[in-house]
Amino acid sequence: MRLGMITLDTLDPAPVAAWWAKLLGGALNDVGGTGEFLVLSGAIPGINLGFAKVPDPTPGKNLIHLDFDLEAGEEREALLDSVRAAGAEHQAHHEYPGIQWDVFTDPFGTVFCIGDAHD
């Protein structure tokens, strides 16, 4: 078994999926052609992002969130600035000996982090 997709619940999948596609690249597919479930493929090697229409927003803090690692040689502040410019809101910076990460929310409230590469 392997992880093949991470799915985000949303009231309106199209704008959420479009935002992530613009940020990460990849191809969007409207599964079934109803606009109720979209899949972003090719943006994250080996993993698809799904965007599912749900009748009610998920309450409270996300139990699962996306963690992105900096690529080797990638300039941290430039990447964080580009994510902010794309519409993400910076929530916090955390630092411990040997690792640091920043917490963001996308324009729809989904929490994600960008941190140092780790195994």
Image: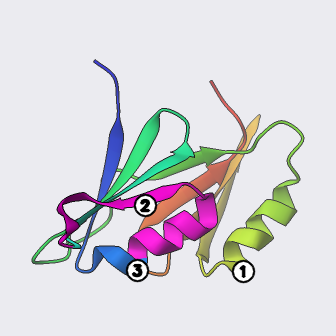
Q: Is residue 96 magenta-colored?
A: no
Q: Is residue 17 magenta-colored?
A: yes
- The vertical placement of 2 against 7, above or below, is above
* Residue topped by disc 1: 85
Which image quarter is the C terminus in? top right
Q: Amino acid at mark 2?
A: Leu
**Any part of residue 23 in sight:** yes
Residue 99 coordinates in the image, percent (x, y): 72, 39
> How many marks overall?
3
Magenta stretch: give its range. 16-34
Which image quarter is the N terminus in? top left
- The vertical placement of 86 against 104, above or below, is below
Residue occupying the point 85% across, 63% down? 77
Which mark is drawn over residue 28? 2
* Residue topped by disc 3: 15
Q: Residue furthest front?
A: 33
Residue 13 coordinates in the image, percent (x, y): 30, 73
Residue occupying the point 61% across, 66% down? 23
Dot 1 falls on a residue whose secondary structure is: helix
Q: Earlier in the sequence, mark 1 or mark 3?
A: 3
- The vertical placement of 64 against 45, above or below, is below
